[in-house]
Every structure is written in C-alpha cells, then in structure tokens.
Image (spheres, rainbow, N blue to C red):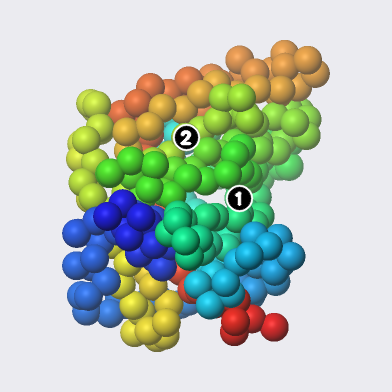
Amino acid sequence: MKTSLRRLAALALGTAMTGTALSAVAAAPAVAAEIPSALYDDSDCPKRSELPADADLGVWQCNVSVIQGGTLKIGSIEQKITKPIKLTWANGFDLETLEDQFIWGPMRAEAIQVDGGVLGIPGSDFLPLLQIHAKPELAADPAVFPDDSTALRLKLKLKVQNPLLGDKCSIGSDQQPLTINLTYLTTNPPPPNKPITGQGPAPTEEDPSVLLSTPVDNAFAAPKSSDCGPWGLLNPIADFRAGLPAKAGTNTAVFPTYLRWTYYTDLP
C-alpha cells in the first residue's frame, strides 16, 4: 500500500497522495493565473545514463515543478516569493520489487530582494549596501513521503547576499538545514501559529496536463545564520535582523506549486 501511495505521489509534485490529495486531483480544475514557462523546460532532467542500468523507460518519468508565488516567513522576516523556484527530478520503480526510486536534479532559483533590507524598514533599502538578497539552495536531497502526513521534505539553506556579509553567509547549512515538511493536510503547529490547510494537486484550466497545488508548513524551526562576515563575526547581526534562531510555531511556508511530468519514452 505504501509503495502504491508513493507511486501516486510521484505523479503529483513527488509527494504523498493521501485521501485528501486524491480527492483534490479529482476536483474541478485549478485556476492558474499564469503557468510559468520554466515548467516546460526539460533540460535539467537526469540523463538516461543516470537512471538505473535496468530501468524500464516506460515507468520512469521526469518531473518539473515550479514554486510560483507564495510566502516564506522565517523569524521576523516575511517574504513574498517573487521569482520562480524550479526543481527537477526523475522517478520510477523496480519492476520486480516495486520499490520507488528517485534521482534528483538541481534546484534553480534567483536571489530575491528581502523587504526592508538591512534595517528592516520598508523603503530604506534603496542603497546596495542596505539591500539583502536571499537565494534558496538544497542542503540535501528532498524526501518524498517520509511519513504519513508529510508530502515533501525540503532541507534548505538560504544564501544571504549583502556586501558586508560576504558570499558565504546563509540561514541554515548542510549540517543544520532549514527543514520544511510540506503537506496538503492541516498542520498542527505549536503556538503562536495556528493550523493551516494545504491544497492537493488539481489540473489547471489552462493546461490540464499541469497540476497546481499548495503544500504548506508552519510547524518548523529556523536555525541560526552561519559564515556571515569574516570568520562568521557578523552572524549575531544577521541573526538579530532575521530574528534567529526562530522556534517551531513562528515560521510559515506557503508554496503554490505547478507540476508537469514526461515519461522518458517521450523525451528526446
């Protein structure tokens, strides 16, 4: 049963398809404001040579997902996602064992200017020295259906860009990542956050082959910053600006996500 759920998950954002999510797929088409063009770019698909040697291309597919819009609140910073975040991966299963397999491609994202900049005051970041940009990067491979309520687990590090902080400053690291457990279900966060509910995948009106969903999480903690300034001397300043570390129940991720997949037999 779990294997079957994971296979359905691979067809919808690479996530666990619970009863709620399955109902969402069968619901009325989702209204897409504008499907991002990056969704139709298969250039990041893992090459056929990267698949298992005995892979049956008829059961392997390349998935392209794009987070378009939404928000990410970490500590004292609540940031709208104004640029697309693209994630590509291949998935299939062993015909004998029926075990699901995933091969992850890159996460591609542009740096987003953080509202309020260094001072945290809207409109004060007109000078480059006062601006802060943040760029999400994978700290580890994502995990599909790691538990019964989590659709997709992302382990991230947010690269923080500012002339004074250097080029290595980040919130989270490979060793202590920002771990977000996205779900279509209703969350159960500690206070002060209150439960929120995600939206399972549904085909879009503009292109029924594209699924639109909104996975969420507001029960995760955010770690301290690291490597900010020479020898990390500016870590405390970065932490003060961002309100880090931020305990579970004070952070929120809402990620409207488009998904499109192509079987490897249909790829060039």
Element under label 2?
A: strand
Could you say which is closer to the camera, residue 166 or residue 86?
A: 86
| Badge 1 density bin: few <14, some 14–19, many ≥20, Cα 10 Å | some
The residues tagged by marks 2 and 1 sit, at their Cα atoms, a distance apart of: 20 Å
- Sequence order check, earlier mark of 2 and 1: 1
**Image quadrant occupied by the C terminus:** bottom right
| Residue 134 in sight | no
Which residue is tagged 2? Answer: 179
| Residue 88 left/right relative to 244 | right
The image shows residue 124 at horizontal and vertical percentages of 59, 39
Spot occupied by residue 134 in the image (x, y as percentages of width and height): 62, 42
Which mark, residue 112? 1
Q: Amino acid at mark 2?
A: Thr
Q: Residues within 10 Å of mark 2 (few under 14, many from 20)?
A: some
Q: Amino acid at mark 1?
A: Ile
User: Mark 1 falls on what kind of element?
Assistant: strand
The residue positioned 51% from the left and 33% from the top of the image is: 178
Q: Residue at x 78, y 15 (%)?
A: 231
216 versus 21 height, above or below: above
Q: Position of residue 170 (x, y in %)?
A: 65, 31
The foreground one among 131 and 82 is 82
Q: Residue reaching furthest front?
A: 96
